[in-house]
Image (tube, coloured by chain):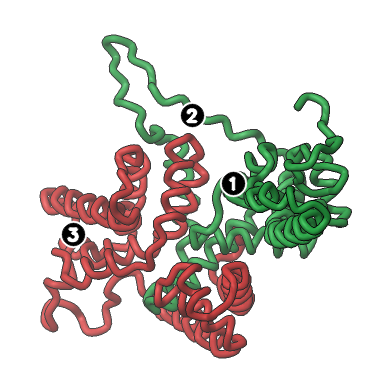
Chain colours: A red, B green
Amino acid sequence: MTSESDTAEATADPPEPDSDRALVARTVAGDSHAFELLVVKYQRRIQRLIGRMVRDVDLVEDIAQETFIRAYRALHQFRGDAQFYTWLYRIAVNTAKKALMELKRDPTVSEAAWRTSDDDDETSRPGNEPIDDETPETVLAAKEIGAMVNAAMEALPPDLREALILREIEGLTYEEIAEAMNCPIGTVRSRIFRAREAVSVRIRPLLENQGGKRW
Amino acid sequence: MHEDERQLLCERISALADGQLDGDALAHTVTLMSVSGEARGAWHTYHLVGDVLRCPDLADCGRDQAFMARFRERLAQAEPPGVPNRVVGDGAVPVVEPIRVRPVESVQALVMPVLAAQAANDAVVRWKWLAAAASLMAVAVLGWHLGTLNPALAPVLATSPVNQAPATAGATIAGMAPPVMLRDPRLDELLAAHRQFGGTSALQMPAGFLRNATFEPVGR
């Protein structure tokens, strides 16, 4: 049910073993707030993954919630020999598959709720029916955020932009970025932070318009 | 929270997002984010920026807050990691004792010690390198000078523990040359407060090959 691109996505994320492992370790030691940070970090990706398998947005969120709860309960079993997201990805796929099997057995659930995009063809879906939870407003809001991120990146000083690109897109470690940019690691840390903050300042008004009260 | 404090906290959050935070700094930052919505917002926004750069489809974040609000309720009810399924028959109890996360009274109460530790550690880290270089130069100069006065000392000086840190300093700065007491008021206060360094001579530098009166803090 998952495509090769999904598998590639699971393994193509920027390598962040240290960050996730530290938060995983704190969670296992009893700090559930650390796990919340992991959820905030991965919730969009996990929901996007599940959304390819399940159409109904409420079901997508339910399955995503269940995925994270299962991961939380089993966190002591995470051996750390793979990326945390790879481990989480497998839990999400298994949880979604299990949910789909149960849904298909339930005669009261509409087929449209679980039918995947693979089942689509032009005759089975009305022309303008949204695929999942997309509405014109959400599509526009997402495009605005995307456009603002790009504009903010273009407006960054070159050294800040390069540092952030090397980190977020190329997935280099701070040490690798320091070598590439011929600067100390502390400078890398500062540039990445300043770049993130500059972009965040530009998109925060858009986020507040969406969600109202902030975190 | 003052702007300087907010900037420092956000810089730590950014570092945490990249796995560049550990130990007490990590613990403090995670605790701060548990009580500060603004800090959690920064964590969310920084990751959103990264997600959007890698995949524009992930820009749809309108339901993120609602998702987290629901999740926190579920998480509060969930069994912690590693807790075995409760067995009614033999009255088994969970084997994992949760750590006690200290109660948080206010963000301010957490921020100041964090910032002080950050500033202190930054000062120590910066001065470590300078101290190492300065101590090497000082020993070299002293060795040259004493060797000039008394050639018999030269072999001793040649094997002097240039790179041997005093036990007290070595315990905290592993692998580094012993620090030199440079005239930095902040560093002086830090050293006096933490009492981590000792055994320095009146020459204000490690000089184990010379007999000097040394200052040994009480209890060492």
Q: Are marks 3 and 1 on the same chain?
A: no
Compared across the picture, whether B161 is left or right of A63 comes to right
Closer to viewer: mark 2 or mark 3? 2
What's under tag 3, amino acid-wise?
Ser
* Image mark for residue A110: 3
A48 or B54: nearer the viewer: B54
On the image, which quarter does residue B85 sit in?
Answer: top left
Identify the residue at horizontal 12%, vertical 53% (top origin). Answer: A104
Between A63 and B49, the one lying in front of the other is B49
Give the residue number, with chain letter if any, for mark 1.
Answer: B174
What residue appears at the point 14 percent right and 75 percent down from the top-left corner?
Answer: A120
Which class describes the residues within 10 Å of circle 2: few (<14), some (14-19), or many (20+)?
some
Residue A206 in the image: x percent, y percent?
Answer: 57, 76
- Indicate which disc residue A149 carries: none
Which circle marks residue B98 in the picture?
Answer: 2
The answer to the question of whether label 2 and label 1 lie on touching residues, with beta carbons closer than 8 A, is no
Q: CA distance from mark 2 to mark 3?
A: 43 Å
> At 63% across and 46% down in the image, what residue appears?
B164
Q: Amino acid at mark 2?
A: Pro
Is B23 above or below relative to B214? below
Going by the picture, which residue comes out furthest to the top? B90
Instruction: Name the mark nearer the viewer: 2 or 1.
Output: 1
Relative to residue A11, is residue A199 drawn left or right? right
Check disc 2 and report its element: helix, strand or loop. loop
Both labels 2 and 3 in a single chain: no
